[in-house]
Image (spheres, rainbow, N blue to C red):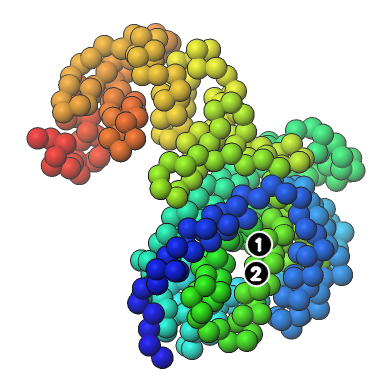
Amino acid sequence: MNKINHLTPDQEQKLGSFREEWFQWGICTDRAERLKAETAISKMYRRCRKEPPGTFVWSKSPAAALIDLQVLKHSVREDDLKAPLWGSFYRSRGDVPRNRLGGSFGSKDQGPLRDDVWEGVRNSLWNPLRDSLEHSLRDSILDSLRDLMRGRLPDTFGGSLRDSLPVSLRDSLPISLRDGFQKSLREQWYGQHDSYWISFNLFCRDIMGVKFESQESEDLDLWRDIAQSAGWWWPYKNFCVIAERPILVRMQEWSANRHRLHCENGPALAFSDGWKVYALNGVRVPPKIVKTPATKLEVNLLLREPNAEIRREIVRKIGIERIMTGLKAEILDERNGYQLLILDLQDGTKRPYLKMLNPSEAIWHIEGVHPDCRTVLEALEWRNNDNLETEILT
């Protein structure tokens, strides 16, 4: 069979609308289609030669789902938890997750996508879909959710969610979550946020006419149905926990067909149980930075923030001039657009900071350097461990 080396004009024309359709599935905020999701998941259990779960537990958010999992782990038989079906479902979609569709959807040795499509259409098809779906959905939403929940869940929730649990369980919940948290985060599938790889295979099959084996095509239909009907999900031997979709997603298009979580006056992502993610320009930030007007944010907030990306957003929101004024900046040295500043830390001490411009986004950064630095070159040497770009120094 001849390889497919490029898209036809008709396929190129359809790519844009297809990409937009699946992007909308990835950020869908409609209530989950529970029957459709449960039916597809039950069929997938059977495809993996497993009995469908006797119980489906629907949670209001991925974070609430992790709490529900802790509840279940206190009440179900240990045997029900020994073999989560992650491995079985992993095999049902072939080697897709290992190499971002660099191989086939089905059999590692005989997959039609690897042999007949991938080599030729990587640039013309996968890159456009990846830019708008994988980066926008996986990097912006999936990673924000996962990072926010990892190790910090007990502090994320308001009292109402915890108070809805029985007192005896609620009292032990933080310890239980910390013990089982990492394990649960390795056992989920992403539902609508798996759209980026599902859409690639669907485009190859439905638009390009790539022939799938019958079993592969049926498996793909099941993955499609789940992505179009629900959020994250956790399959176990006798039960399956599924999270509802978010009720709000706010994203910013920052380059062609690429989006990131962003909202300047409220949450960028929210679920019906009140769980929220605040983000500016794709960077997850504390709610205070979003909710407080720029004129009321304290400039010394910059000095207390250890995360460089969050510092960048603080500078962007407050404004570089106000920060320099508020921290009584003195310029020690300048070189090729860099400035070494002395800032008043407002605790009786002063310290050098390097001011630099990100040329790709025209955003100012301020970064603390070693107290002994007195020139831009010394600051750059300390910051980059003597591994300097030639153009910085010339």
* Residue shown at 54% from the left, 25% from the top: 289
Query: Rounded to the nearest whole Å, what is the CA distance between mark 2 and mark 1?
Result: 6 Å
* Residue shown at 90% from the left, 43% from the top: 166
Label 1, secondary structure: give it.
helix
Q: Is residue 368 left or right of residue 379?
A: right
Q: Is residue 18 visible?
A: yes
Callout 1, which amino acid?
Answer: Ala
Vertical comparison of 358 with 345: above or below: below
As drawn, the label of residue 227 is 1
21 or 393, nearer to the observer? 21
Q: Residues within 10 Å of mark 1 (few under 14, many from 20)?
A: many
* Residue shown at 18% from the left, 29% from the top: 378
Are the residues tagged 2 and 1 within 8 Å (C-beta)? yes
Vertical comparison of 218 with 296: above or below: below
Q: Is residue 56 left or right of residue 29?
A: right
234 or 361, nearer to the observer? 361
Q: Is residue 151 visible?
A: no
Residue 328 horizontal/vertical position (percent): 34, 8
352 or 329, nearer to the observer? 329
Toward which corner of the image does residue 57 lie, by quadrant?
bottom right
Residue 264 horizontal/vertical position (percent): 54, 28
Q: Residue under circle 2? A: 223
Callout 2, which amino acid?
Answer: Trp
